[in-house]
Amino acid sequence: MGHDNKKHEVERTPIGLRDVSHGLGQTFLGLTRVNLPGQLLAGVTLLAIAIPEQLATAQLAGVPAFTGMIAFIAATLVFSFVGSNPILSVGADSTIAPLFAVALVSISLPASSQYYALVAGTALITGVILSVIGLLRLGWLADFLSAPIVVGFLGGIGVIIIVHQLPRIFGVSSGGDSIIQRLTSLGHNLHATCGWTLVIGLGTLAVMLLGERVNPRLPWALAAVLVSSLFVGLFSLSAHGVQDLGTVVVGLPTWRLRLFSAHQWSVMITTSLTLVVVIMSQSAASSRTSADEIGVADDLSRDFVGIGLANVATGLLGSFAVDASPARTTISRLAGGRTKMVGFTAAIGALALSPLATFARDIPLSALAGVLLFVAGRLIKVAQMRQILHCSRPEFALAVLAGLGVVFLGVEMGLALAVGLAILEQTWRSARPRMVEMGRRRGSTSWEPYDAHAVERVDHILAVLFDQDLFFANANVFRRELHAMLKKYPDTKHVILDAVAISDIDYTALGVLDEVVNDLSADHISISLARANTALKEKLHRAGEKTLRHMELYDSVDAAAQSLK
């Protein structure tokens, strides 16, 4: 049994020996004659998963079905040659499709040439922004939103996808701008539910859910869509109210860009900025996780350049914005993918099969809706929400607020709320630091938190550790906490500030620190700093206040304490 498991383990490169491929000449870095068959098979597996998902996402985006295949082919090929991560799958993604679809239908008619032009233009703008972020090595911006807020935000998008697809599952019409309006409209039309449509939609969803438990590497979505199409054709279910995809026009990419008005530009730019935030968050998580799992180096900024240029390509080819897919990337890894040959094989395979896309006309819309319900379900991470609740109630509240903001205020307002919550969260953390009382461990020179075992106070000495940088938002907190400590120990003659956690101090905090030093001096209490870093020492030496320039600095808390004897 152990021997079998070892056969399927992916060979890993030790962290210290990992390297990122550079240049087109190293596109297929890691590919050998030995692993080539396995990489080709992984590519075929990715293709089988991608075909129904791309068609369904094109429906979600409100564009012709084959446009989804164009997006997948172009994005995958571009990223294969430019991106860093060898198995990151880039293409049409249901996470961002409703974002631009909802925003752009507000300024154009759905399924119109103007709408298609706006969709392509949004992809182009998104790509340019992402490429600039990558070229400027600003990949760290992806860490701005905390994991709980991202979980809540994506969960809200999942709810929106589900609500938008329910009418196709039931085979009824629905309308409305908000979630409440859509659900109300759906409820009023449930009496007209088409039984066959409901069976096909829920059947597709059931096959994917069960199939994932049996073997997630197998193309269950493709199998379910093919079987449902055959079922509809054999029993002529179109005559019984089952709606199909209809004519799928297969052809060369179309130039859709045109001159846009100032208002259209403003909407496209706003929408693109929304997409950029979501793409960065999702792509960063997918790229880092998959790189660690297969044991390769990651270069997030270069991945953003790859995804950005992929969006530029899809925009120029008349398609729509693309993103890195966590689901498809995971499938590639489970199938044994390790090199860029996986994506390259899937893209070439999709290109070769493109003429057969005309046969997709018999695919029931409810089957594609079932695929999207499955994808939406993966965005709603109930288990992770439970973990967040167990770990931190405030962060759980932020996640819930981010999700509710997307559902009830719309995606753009929801994103603005998520960013606002992230700023609020960071400000709250920074402005609520801890002042830790220190003591000396019995029989040693080690100073540790006073509540630890065998740690004792030293008479007349108050040693404290401040666990944040000192800046305008928390400087007065530092002052209040220190005053509270002195009230607790009124016999204090010497204060030692362990500055190991203070990496920087701003002008406001320098002023507050000067006031603290003067207050202590007036009470005949000395103060010294221990373990201050070079940057902090330089700030103190350059300070305008003489008291700060002449503060006593020591390499350790114990050295500061010993000097007081």
Image (tube, helix red, strand yellow):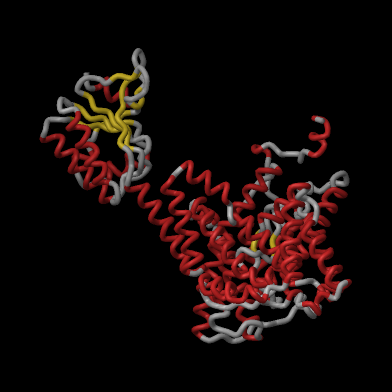
Q: Is residue 259 visible?
A: yes
Q: Is residue 79 left or right of residue 98?
A: right
- Where residue 562 sits, quadrant-wise, is top left
Name the spot of residue 524 as percent of width and height, x first. Answer: 12, 30
- Where residue 488 sits, quadrant-wise, is top left
In the picture as drawn, the residue positioned furthest to the left comes out as 522
Name the spot of residue 506 as percent of width and height, x first. Answer: 30, 49
Q: For the point 36% across and 15% down, which residue is it?
A: 444
Q: Is residue 273 left or right of residue 117?
A: left
- Report the front residue among 287 and 408: 408
Where does the N terminus fall, quadrant-wise?
Answer: top right
- Report the front residue among 448 and 531: 448
Q: For the point 66% across and 71% down, which residue is it?
A: 60
Number of numbered discs on residues: 0
- Where residue 91 sits, quadrant-wise, is bottom right
Q: For the point 36% across and 25% down, which residue is it?
A: 448
In this view, 177 is above or below 210: below
Q: Is residue 71 left or right of residue 284?
A: right
- Report the front residue among 253 and 147: 147
Name the spot of residue 15 as percent of width and height, x first. Answer: 65, 38
Where does the C terminus fall, quadrant-wise?
Answer: top left
Q: Is residue 72 visible?
A: no
Q: For the point 71% across and 64% down, which residue is it?
A: 370
Name the spot of residue 546 as percent of width and height, x first. Answer: 19, 42
In the picture as drawn, the residue positioned furthest to the top comes out as 443
In the picture as drawn, the residue positioned furthest to the front comes out as 191
